[in-house]
Image (cartoon, helix red, strand yellow):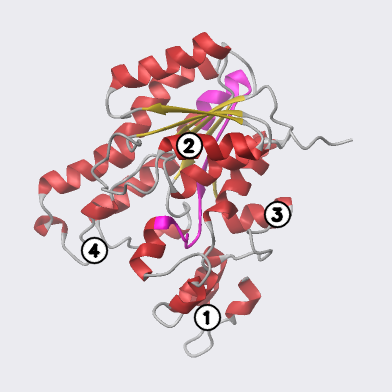
Amino acid sequence: MTTKTPLKGKVALVAGATRGAGRAIAVELGRAGATVYATGRTTREHLSEMGRAAETIEETAELVTAAGGEGIAVPTDHLEPERVRALVERIDAGHGRLDILVNDLWGGNQLLDFQTKMWDVDLDRGLRMLDLGVKSHIITSSVALPLLVRRTGGLVIEVTDGTAESNKGFRENFYYDLAKNAPIRMAFILGEELKSVGGTAVAVTPGFIRSEEMLDIFGLTEENWRDGIDKQAHWALSESPVYVGRAVAALATDPGQTRWNGRSLDSGQLAREYGFTDADGSRPDVWGYLKAEGEAEEGHRPPMEDYR
């Protein structure tokens, strides 16, 4: 007999839960019954450098609770070790355990200079991207893992963009490439170290995600997102944040999750494995399509409908 709340009694920290993938992951973990600490820099009283007032960690926590879990919002800049220590001490004092750590920290899209050579990118902008996408993950794991490893079976999720296979190609920006490949390597290394305590670490990537920010860039909403296909053909295989949220929840509730240890995984791959779908009932697989497209002979692109 299965339960609808297999994570009841479990405690998760979703670092970077303000919007997009992080918010959806927090909500889906809550739907599975977990207590979820949702952290980030944008609150109803404070705006982060991203300048997006519409999404806050308080709202994320409320969505977690509405889904059936317990959402707890804690404003945290994960580049400040003392703030992260205070957060982990609060989790320890309140629950004495941490079962799931999700590093979904980023917030550097506004710094991107695609199609710009490394030597033409402002150094401060580039280093800020590495702070946001790499250093923040390291600080959070360093501080939170001592609590997570008190119990066997802990799970660490490094959220990134791309897999080890897909990221072998050129990612168009020196700093972005480093920022998105580093979490993949972190998951591999942590996976090796967590073996001794029965833990698991994996990197997880969404596909072409229709985050709040991306929908704004396209000038669309979740209701009319298909209108963007004419602007970008691969948009036809885009996915809502719910998809990667369900991917992480499926991993977290899988008693055999250790078989994935150290690997980099994508939402479409995990959907095939666990049988879940996106919110609209589809099963998009943009990474699978891009691989097939790259291997196809010129003029013989695979049909997109086979990957949705």
Q: Nearer the viewer, mark 4 or mark 2?
A: 4
Q: Residue at x 47, y 72 (%)?
A: 235
Q: Position of residue 285 (x, y in %)?
A: 58, 65
Label 2 and label 1: CA atoms lie apart by: 31 Å
Determine which residue is flagged by label 1: 296
The mark found on residue 114 in the picture is 4
Q: To which quarter of the image does residue 83 belong?
A: top left
Q: Are marks 4 and 2 in contact (CB under 8 Å)?
A: no
Q: Which residues are magenta?
A: 191-212
Determine the secondary structure under disc 1: loop
Crowding near the residue tagged with mark 4, few <14, some 14–19, many ≥20 C-alpha atoms within 10 Å: few
Could you say which is closer to the camera, residue 71 or residue 143?
Answer: 71
Q: Pick whichever of labels 2 and 1 is earlier in the sequence.
A: 2
Mark sitting earlier along the chain (2/3): 2
Question: Residue 131 location in percent, x, y?
Answer: 25, 37
Q: Secondary structure at mark 2?
A: helix
Quadrant in which the N terminus appears:
top right
